[in-house]
Image: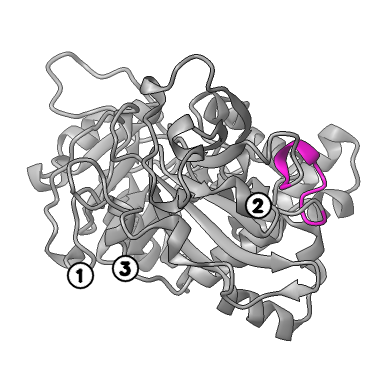
Amino acid sequence: NGRGVMIAPPPYSSATLEREGIRPRTIVGIILTHCHADHDAGAFQKVLTGSPVVVITTPTIYKSFIQKYAALSALSPALLMHSHRHKPAIIGSPLRFQGATFRFTYTLHSIPCVGFRVEWRGRSMVFTADHFNDPPVIDKLQERGVLSKGRADDLKNIPLQETDLLLHEAGAPPIHTPLKVLLQLPDRVKRRLYVVHTSALPEDCDLRVAPTGTAGTIRLDQGQQPNSWSNASNEYETINEDSSSSTKQLRTMETSISYHGLQRNKIRANSFVGHKRIESSDHSPPLVSLRAASSTDAWFILNLLSAVPFLTSLSYASTMEVLETARVEAYCKDTVIVPSSRRNHVLCVVWEGTCVERKISESRSNRTSRTSSPLLPIHELDSQINFGAVWYAGDWTGPIALQPEKRLSGDSPLTSTHDVVAMSI
């Protein structure tokens, strides 16, 4: 859905993600598993960046997080708590976030630590977090009365849950899982398992280390039709994003604006966006067009619009009108999103991808009807066609009253000569 959640982020995670092309505004949540620095320092840095984020963890771990970083930073606990929103994770109760369902459980570690299972449209993932998973030792702790039977059974069940993807940690006992334990897991479990928290695997080991970076993205939705999630295979492959592919898509949310208020659907005419805006050169539909409608789409629209100062103070009735007016559209690379003639009338917020100001081609400007004219690909434009402002996920363009940064607004010096064009990377 174009938005991400950081899990147990180590130091400088936000900077690392940005180097990979993931914009800060696309990260809407942090799952805080425990308060060791290699798993929570990135969370502290993220909540101080100013971009809205939700911290998800148990009340016990959250209290430790606030106390720890208030002491280290000399900031007041109240100030830290004001920098984000805490969504409590209650053990034994499902937690809904971004349309997915999370179920948290305490793992066996030196300090309070949680792992979780997340389910979304028939697909699932289990993340163990730091966890000493050694069944014989757990049984001995139960025999000595340190653990109850229910607690011991829960700890041993984590890696054996039926799930599409298992991210299991490994490291030095007695606070991490010995590698020998993972090697002894059933083959059906190891086929869907990636090892995290370590890269030291023997050469002849049949386990896999979780790939890193965007080039190592593991997708559970690859090639899935909207209603076929439950029939999906449990096999995975690491994919490399092809940045030159013409099927790269850009999702934008557009709504019409006038100086006298929101005009319902008057400016959202098909004449300038075209009926082929979600088609690629090979006529295959983009993944985003296959995505079924989500109950969180309204949340995304409001979340995007919250970046626009004018709209943050709207009443409930006006907010409902915005939801009725707003549209989520998908565009192919090199497609005009907002023609220069309408840039001062349309509020366009980028959901996912990248937009640029691009000079109107000569062939377009000579036509009476600009909406039906072809848009030349970037590589075919001559050197005199230049670019202006760039918009990333979470940025917006519109009238100067709604976008005070002039170069990004409809009153940009290039407005009369430049369209806003999709250039997803």
* Residue 372 percent location from the top left of the image: 38, 51
Location of residue 97 with respect to 416 vertically, above or below: below
Foreground: disc 2 or disc 3: 3
- Pointer 1 or 2: first along the chain: 2
Location of the C terminus (image quadrant): top left
- Secondary element at tag 1: loop
* Residue 6 percent location from the top left of the image: 52, 43
Measure the alpha-carbon separation of dots 2 and 3. Answer: 25 Å
Q: Is residue 392 left or right of residue 174?
A: right
Foreground: disc 1 or disc 2: 1
* Residue 282 percent location from the top left of the image: 17, 42
Q: Are marks 1 and 3 in contact (CB under 8 Å)?
A: yes
Q: To which residue does mark 2 refer?
A: 53
The segment highlighted magenta reads 401-410
Measure the alpha-carbon separation of dots 1 and 3. Answer: 8 Å
Q: To which residue does mark 1 refer?
A: 227
* Residue 16 percent location from the top left of the image: 55, 25
Q: Residue at x 77, y 50 (%)?
A: 403
Residue 311 marker: none
Residue 64 in view: yes
Q: To which residue does mark 3 refer?
A: 292
- Pointer 1 or 3: first along the chain: 1
Residue 391 in view: no
Location of the N terminus (image quadrant): bottom left
Q: Residue at x 16, y 66 (%)?
A: 228
* Type of amino acid under label 2: Val
Q: Residue at x 40, y 49 (%)?
A: 331
* Type of amino acid under label 1: Asn
